[in-house]
Amino acid sequence: MTTQQRAALIAQYKDGYNQVADAVKGITKDELDFRPAPNKWMPREIVHHLADSEMTSAIRLRKLLVEPNAQIQGYDQEEFARMLHYDERPIDASLLALQAARETTAQLLGLMNKNDWQRVGNHSESGAYPIERWLEIYAVHAHNHADQIRRARKLCSENRSRKP
């Protein structure tokens, strides 16, 4: 990965929270709880997933930076959603958790040196897990889910307009 590619991914990472905040701005309860299809998450669940995923990713980066051959444990996101009541909790605290995880981790990304970027851990599900791979995954993660929220809101609105 070139320095320019890395800088672009870091900028994208830093913008992730803004994308999610924009996607939920002015969201109604109907939109928040709209399930776009069976087995698809509603926006409320997506926000909670993002908070938990981002807190987990923040710890993953720290482990990669600090621990030799860090062991990164995968987790079952569907079980998190079920057991942590993603479908019924308010989203405000999860938005704050997402924001804090992103901001504190972005600070670390800005302070990393050439040797830090070379560190590699081991992911329980995918094997070798270099820090640059971590960045590739999480740079787009919030953006992808923000787009998912926007699509769900649009579908909710379209469904409302079709009802007599």
Image (cartoon, helix red, strand yellow):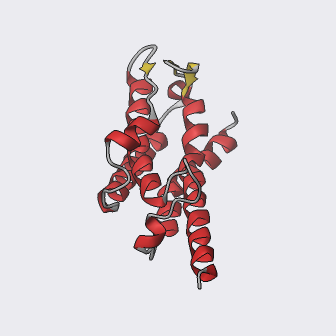
Vertical position of residue 67 compared to residue 60: above or below: above
Vertical position of residue 142 compared to residue 5: above or below: below
Which one is in front, 136 or 141?
Answer: 141
Which one is in front, 34 or 92?
Answer: 34
Which residue ends up furthest to the front in the rendered image? Answer: 164
For image coordinates 48% across by 35% down, the residue present is 112
* Residue 54, percent from left and from top: 42, 44
For image coordinates 69% across by 33% down, the residue present is 1
From where the camera sits, is residue 128 visible? Answer: yes
From where the camera sits, is residue 55 visible? Answer: no
Which one is in front, 129 or 30?
Answer: 30
Question: Residue 118 lies in what quarter of the image?
Answer: top right
Which residue ends up furthest to the bottom in the rendered image? Answer: 164
For image coordinates 51% across by 32% down, the residue present is 113
Numbered marks: total: 0
Apparent side of residue 162 relative to residue 101 in the rendered image (left or right): right
For image coordinates 43% across by 29% down, the residue present is 75
* Residue 145, percent from left and from top: 55, 53
Q: Which quarter of the figure is the C terminus placed in?
A: bottom right
* Residue 79, percent from left and from top: 40, 35
Vertical position of residue 90 compared to residue 71: above or below: below
Question: Residue 27 lies in what quarter of the image?
Answer: bottom left
* Residue 132, percent from left and from top: 59, 31
